[in-house]
Amino acid sequence: MGAKILRWREHDNEAVLQEAVAILARGGLLAIPTETVYGLAADAGNGEAVAAIFAAKGRPRFNPLIAHVADAAMAARCGRLEKGARRLVEAFWPGPLTLVVPLASGAPIHPLVTAGLDTVALRQPAGPSATLIARFGRPLAAPSANVSGRLSPTRASHVLAELGDKIEAVVDAGPCRVGLESTIVSLTGETPRLLRPGGLAAEEIEAALGEKLVRYRPGEAGNALQAPGMLASHYAPRARLRLSVAAVDEGEALLAFGPSLPANAAAARAMRNLSDKGDPVEAAANLFAFLRELDESGAPVIAVAPIPSAGLGEAINDRLARAAAPRPA
Ligand code: TXA
Ligand code: MG
């Protein structure tokens, strides 16, 4: 756990910014806080640094990464933002929305970031990271700062536990406000497509676009490239998950939602409630941290209460379904 902790404060982060920029400038790996999850960041224009991201995560293949930008102007140097994209940038950036758009010529982005595609995924994160990227002056490539296939980190401590010996430092700005990865929308085809539900509800995006998003369907023709977050098993804790339970079995851990608990809740070895009042936004912010805590209880199975799919519930249920899917051997 050799990584340094750079604590972000409300005021005067000059020393943190200088140290963080120095790490990025020499091609080092830096974990950064975003409102969604912590990211494992490096200079998007430095191929060796980007390769080090894949190595640190143990990503089995070179899947494309999101390029994080400081603002819309930096985004426009990386990708071609047409009408729909500009509208979404205006409405939701900084925020938990990633846009896949055609790659701009001369973009300061190494081909390893886009996996050689002629499209690029762009996002302006909120908070300290945008300040840091502005200071650095170039986009940062950053997947979630977890070992490939494991839960995304929503606290600096999660990052240190998994990647502490592989990164130079983590900028610690406390718990992530949203707690789910960004929603990914592709604007490269005739109609906007939802590649991954996430921290911004699809309904809000549709309202801003005045158009329905085409949902990704596994196996659908013409969908050769999907977000790898689309792999069936992803975001997995060690325990098995049992979803939409009506009753808890002896020895299971319980992930509850809302004021009414499943039957036999008292038999649970450990319990966390995503939101006592049944608020999907609060539930999203707690999801990954609570799954980790219940996993650490040592229970072989985590029983999960039913969660309605409206709003952020769509993304919560997406992550839970992936965590419950059969694992590759
Ligand atoms: O909230 C988030 O999105 C977090 C924080 C750190 O920003 N990042 C994150 O990154 O979740 P990652 O690498 O775990 O997921 C990025 C997703 C992948 O599923 C990848 O396939 C997709 O974005 N992606 C990246 N570039 C793409 C492209 N050109 N076309 C389609 N999908 C792309
Ligand atoms: Mg990830």
Image (spheres, rainbow, N blue to C red):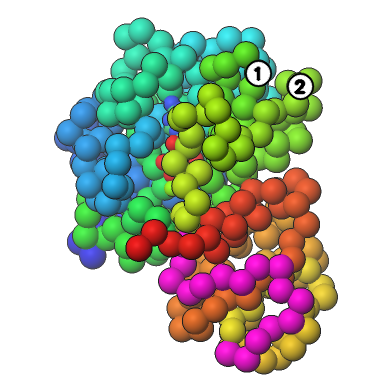
Circle 1 is placed at which residue position? Answer: 191
- Residue at x-position 55% and y-position 28%: 221
| Relative image position of residue 118 (x, y in whole percent) | 39, 16
Circle 2 is placed at which residue position? Answer: 211
Q: Amino acid at mark 2?
A: Glu
Residue 245 among those drawn in magenta: yes
| Relative image position of residue 127 (x, y in whole percent) | 51, 40
Span shown in magenta: 236-251
Name the quarter showing ligand 1: top left
| Relative image position of residue 43 (x, y in whole percent) | 28, 31
Q: Amino acid at mark 1?
A: Thr
Tell me: 205 left or right of 197: right
Residue 260 got which mark?
none
Quick check: marks 1 and 2 in contact, CB under 8 Å? yes
- Depth check, front residue: 103 or 263: 263
Q: Quadrant of residue 68?
A: top left
- Residue at x-position 35% and y-position 53%: 148
- Residue at x-position 76% and y-position 76%: 246
